[in-house]
Image: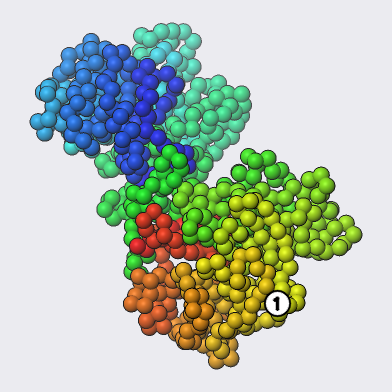
Amino acid sequence: MFDNTGRKISADTDIKWSGEGGERGEIGLLPEDHAAFVAGNTDLLPGILQAADQAPPTAFSFGHAPNLYWLPYLMTGDKKYLGYMESYYRKFCEKMSKPYDNWVGWQQSGRYLAWTLRQLVQLAYLEKMGLTKNTYYLTALSNAKKYYLNNVIGASKDKPYYDVWRVLAFNSVTYKSFGWTGWMESMVGQVINYTVHLGFDDWLPIAQWQFEHLNRRVNLWSVKAVDNDHIFFYDRAKKGEITDYKSAKLWATTHGWEDVTEYSVNIMNKPTYKKWDKDTLFTADAKVDGRFFTYRNRAQYAYAWAALAAQNDIEGAAEIANLLREKIDERGDRWDYKNYQSGYPFSIKKSENFTPQVWNPIRDDKGKVIKSSWSALPISSRDNPHLLRISNLDPVGEITALLESNGFNTSKMYGYSHVKGTFTAWVGQAFDNYSKVVYYPWGGGHADSSINGIWKLDLNKLKFEVESMPSDPDLQGSEWSDKYKKLGGNGSFTTYMDGASVISYVLPDGRPPSQHTYGGVAKVGDVLFTTRNRKYAYNVKTKEYSVEGWKKNGSKFKTSIQNAVFPYKGKVFGILKADLQYSGWNKLESAESTNILDIDAPPRGINFVGQHLIFQMNESKIMVMNYHKKSGKNVYSIFDMKTESWGDLVETYGLPAHSYTQEMQAGVYIRSWGSKGSVLREFSYGSLRGQWYLLDLATSQYTPFSFTGYEVQAGTFVGNKAFIADIGGIKALFYLAVNSKVSEVYVMRIQ
């Protein structure tokens, strides 16, 4: 369980033992790549093992010491990794001039305490199993526990400094502040709770005692100061009271908690800070009023501390963990593996009851989703249709970013919905089953969007790409008229209007205008084309565009809007209709053909008046579903492209009464659901918009349907943007949802 950040996580084989480079991914309860492995990126293991083949050097930074050997030993049982762990621990002790069985002392605080204790508790865990060469780890852990219980926690509550000291004990003191409480104290908190997790329950009182620090930070100082770096008291003292280490400690032990503050007076008096909502995290990673306040990941470290404490049932920890998670998400921070140092966030549910809602695909070094990642998806059934959102797959956001990075001036996007409109405005798609690429050519049109680029979704990589950039409205020699820029001159970008108000079906640069493409999108061989008005085509190999008029029965023919076409072995079948044409069935002999042929029409009862759903069931069959208004029946028939013949008209039952204008519905056939398979159907318009029904072809019965897992958002006029693909050794349903609120892609494994 984790929030994928969208950046590639690779095994870290270049360990900076000296700690240069600041807050590297190797710092933490687990290194970042190890945490990612625990969270599901199993392809990282070879690189993790490679990095762990190096012995710890004589000198290294104790504040940046990586937990390099623990996971490799657990995964392999190779004793060399255990030997490195034992050597590593001895070097800690020798650095501190402490005996191996009693290393802890008051000066061991912050990261020096956190990483030494982390190493010790792992070795103590293994010593209990009789696996270590040396046998002083359990003794050392016991001595550390006694030290903190007797010398720290056992301080008398009658002493005036007790309430302050109890939450500062694990931090080094300077004469101006107790340092790094928003950072190192969280690291210590994670390790102490990790100690309890590994079965050393006698450390629970220490974890409870130390958690009071975070409790005070959240509930006394408020959320806006929870991710501070230091807590201060120097400028709260009278002049001359604190001049050095000794006087600072004396002052801290004789004053109450109210005299210790989250920031220095100078910072807290800054106008922005004073006015900031106390229940909102403060601005991070930037200067405010000329001063730097905090780093973005400090609150995430605190969250990880609270999350682990919550799993130890420490009072108040669950509430703080949930609060911090909410506030961090609210601020818009990027969650990454490093700040989930245990490999998982807090959940009040037991892990066996957790059902994931987001899938984080694992990719190889070329960006391709690896087969084991596909195989890790749960197989859904009719009784448990487990749909997952694919993490960091944002159609609108990715295409917008790609346009900008490739130099397209976004101020030249005319219309009211820009890139979003290229997905939502009655836009179809073409899925190339051979390359596993989905194409979205020149969508938009009307008043939605003027940009006429070609987008594609590569299922192998689960990544959106720009196949062809949109036309440049200001390209010298092919400039758009001002009339066209103003909603096409006639309220629509679907046709071009020049300065003299002359209408054309092609832009000045010879390319198709943006338009509502409906279901009339197909890719046959290298040719991608749409069918509305003209045959607009693009060759994915040569990158050339063409615009040609349609012909039918030897005459020019203008197609209308609600078309749907499907390829089969170089030919194309479907409905290529004119205005006010509600029946018929058509064929193109090849991808290059512009000659529309009439072939056998579907059975009486099937028509195309905007109440129909047409989709490709498999390689050779098309299903046409319709409401037959005259009889009041819901019916379907299946067309076989191989034999060019229709099946019987079949009546279905179970749909509620509804308005039947249902253009651009979603429909997929799932053969493994039922003896004859089932059709999963989403209504995308009218009174049933966003509702799903499952049609069992054996019984002809519809039943209401809902997914488990992620709460699917209804796409706008989704059309065939719900489809099934064989990919990575599995069969899965993909569903693209873009509307005013979301831009997401979902997946549900079927086989």
Give residue 121's position: percent from left, percent from top.
21, 29
Residue type at mark 1?
Lys
Judge whether 115 appears above or below 513 on screen: above
- Asked whether residue 295 is in view, the answer is yes
Which residue lies at the image location 84% right of the left edge and 53% below the top edge? Answer: 482
Pointer 1 local density, CA inside 10 Å: few below 14, some 14–19, many at least 20:
few
Q: Is residue 543 above or below residue 127?
A: below
The foreground one among 327 and 258 is 327
The residue sitting at 53% across, 57% down in the picture is 438
Q: In this view, does 199 lie to the left or right of 233?
A: left
Using the rendered image of the protein, determine whether residue 625 is visible from the camera's viewpoint.
no
Q: Quadrant of the rendered structure where residue 420 is?
A: bottom right
**Which residue is disc 1 drawn over?**
552
Furthest residue in direction right, as rendered: 500
Expressed as whole percent of the image width and height from the top left, the position of residue 591 reads 61, 65
Using the image, determine if residue 462 lies above or below residue 182.
below
Where residue 564 sits in the image (x, y, percent)? 59, 71
